[in-house]
Image: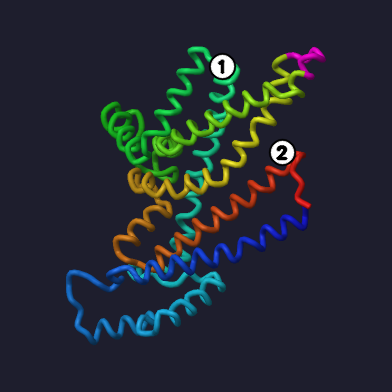
Amino acid sequence: MGKFIIRRFIGLIPTLFIVITVSFFIIRLAPGGPFDSEKVLPPEIKENIEKKYHFDEPLVMQYLRYMGDVIRLDLGPSFRYRDHDINFFIATSFPNSLLLGLVTMFFALLFGIFFGTIAALRQNTIMDYVLMSCAIVGISIPVFVIGPVLQYYVALKWKLVPTSGWVTGRNGAITLILPVISLMVAYVANIARLSRASTLEVLRSDYVRTARAKGLSESIIIVKHVLKGSLLPVVSYLGPALAAIFTGAVVIEYIFRIPGMGRYFIQGAFNRDYTMIMGVVIVYSCMLLLLNFIVDIIYGFLDPRISYS
């Protein structure tokens, strides 16, 4: 197991290298640049600015210079926000995005597993049909539709919660309600469907029939045997789901004015702020790779049939 963890962790490095390389060249080869604006700069001033940020060098040299900075954990200066570098913006915004993502996934797991298990235990009943129908609806509606609709009705029309803000403001944790609900709807639906299918499979397994034959109560069978086995597909889904939550939060953070990385990513895209975009991409990529790595390890502990030798 230890050797597998080490090999798997080392294998993350070339993947991250490829992601950074491809992202760098795609962004740099796109039309426009960070110093393009409606006001035309004099050639001398533009030349001096490009020289300051090494834009006068060949693209390969710019790439090698940037990779050297990344290895030193220096994501470079922002081309638009001159007061701080990219490391500062990531350090101040990442905890907010992380909190939003973790809270969303916690409630998505809680409700998704609960609804999926109930649907499986009540298979082919009205409860099952209603829950799975709601799951299909939840998967079908995009997050950028759910967010504004909730914001309009719950916040603006009914005035139950603030329209925007963050936990550090005067409204406190109540500002999490709408963004968390907006983000978690699709994931609750997906987890519920996965839980239902895996629970039905486990309920038909031999060891569950053996447990019933031994006279164990239904509640003990479900808690000790069924739930653990049915969690395996959900655990495999966690890595990509968490990464999708963080990247999907870009839109939600913008809608609800959450001071997370999503705001800087969108502004960086509008401003063609190369280093800002690259910084957010690198952080998101590291999160995706690390989460998949953790999921692989957890999966091995939950399923004794899996061997990492």
Crowdedness near tag 2: few (<14), some (14–19) or many (≥20) residues, C-alpha within 10 Å: some
User: Does residue 147 appear to the left or right of 242 in the view shown?
Assistant: left
- Contact, mark 1 vs mark 2 (Cβ under 8 Å): no
Counting labels gives 2
Q: Is residue 144 above or below residue 7?
A: above
User: Does residue 274 appear to the left or right of 226 in the view shown?
Assistant: left
Q: Position of residue 297 (x, y in %)?
A: 69, 48
Magenta region: which residues? Answer: 210-217
Q: Which of the two residues, 62 or 199, is positioned nearer the viewer here?
A: 199
Q: Is residue 264 above or below residue 235?
A: below
Q: Which residue is mark 2?
A: 302
The residue that appears at 48% across and 31% down in the rendered structure is 189
**Disc 2 residue type?**
Leu
**Disc 1 residue type?**
Gln
Location of residue 304 (image quadrant): top right
Per the image, is 62 magenta? no
- Residue lying at the far right of the rendered structure: 214
Location of residue 267 (image quadrant): bottom left
The residue that appears at 43% across and 61% down in the rendered structure is 89
Q: Which residue is mark 1?
A: 123
Q: Earlier in the sequence, mark 1 or mark 2?
A: 1
Q: Position of residue 303 (x, y in %)?
A: 73, 38
Q: Secondary structure at mark 2?
A: helix
Circle on res. 97? none
Q: Position of residue 150 (x, y in %)?
A: 33, 32
